[in-house]
Amino acid sequence: MRKPTASKPTFLQKWRDELPGVAASLTTAFVLFLVSLSFAPVRNWLFGEEARAYPIFCTADPVVARDGRRIIEFYIVNRSLEDYSAEALQGLLDQTLRGSGTSASAAITLPFRGGEGRIERAYADAEFNRGKGEILVRAEPGAVHIGLRQIDGAAILRVFIVLADMPDVGPIPRDAKVAVPFEFHDIQENCYTRQ
């Protein structure tokens, strides 16, 4: 009697088997990049003098949750080694903008520009942010407001924004900024609200 032979794995099966290693490599690369930001020569090379005038920058990444809802991971990064309170950030912002004829708030407002969908809720990632700073998050139908109460030097804080009733677009690459339905491009290099 002949023994059954195992079928040869397909390309997709092989790729699926490699995904944990790929994810680990990408995570390691991201962590190494963030660590490199703590060194002045790297920061000076990546960010111009104007961008360093205000120490806070932001970025956002779209994620599709297991239940299909779209989540925006919004990151607030202190590119300096100094700790800042809300008052200190506002003072630094006022000093940076002095003479420009513009005013701004260190609090962050993210206007929702999505023609479809709605903001279901927004909240600070308490576990991720523990020991690095404190933020207050408030969502309303047309915007998410983030009050940065305190941020430690070289710290990264995270806010989750959960969206509902969004069109199904399938998998979204984390760096697909076009899938982030908020006006946040103006605040990526200097993260504050223009008034």
Image (cartoon, helix red, strand yellow):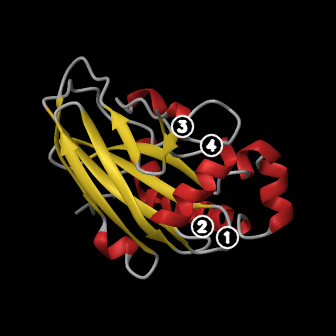
Q: Which residue is mark 3?
A: 103
Q: Nearer the viewer, mark 4 or mark 1?
A: 4
Q: Which residue is mark 4?
A: 189
Disc 3 to disc 1, C-alpha distance? 32 Å
Q: Residue at x 67, y 70 (%)?
A: 35
Tag of residue 31: 2
Q: Residue at x 43, y 73 (%)?
A: 133
Q: Residue 56 vs residue 119: left or right?
A: right
Q: Position of residue 49 (x, y in %)?
A: 81, 47
Which comes before the other along the chain, label 2 or label 3? Answer: 2
Tag of residue 35: 1
Which comes before the other along the chain, label 2 or label 4? Answer: 2
Residue 77 image-quadrant placement: bottom right
Residue 38 image-quadrant placement: bottom right
Amino acid carrying label 2: it is: Val
Disc 3 to disc 4, C-alpha distance? 17 Å
Which comes before the other along the chain, label 3 or label 1? Answer: 1
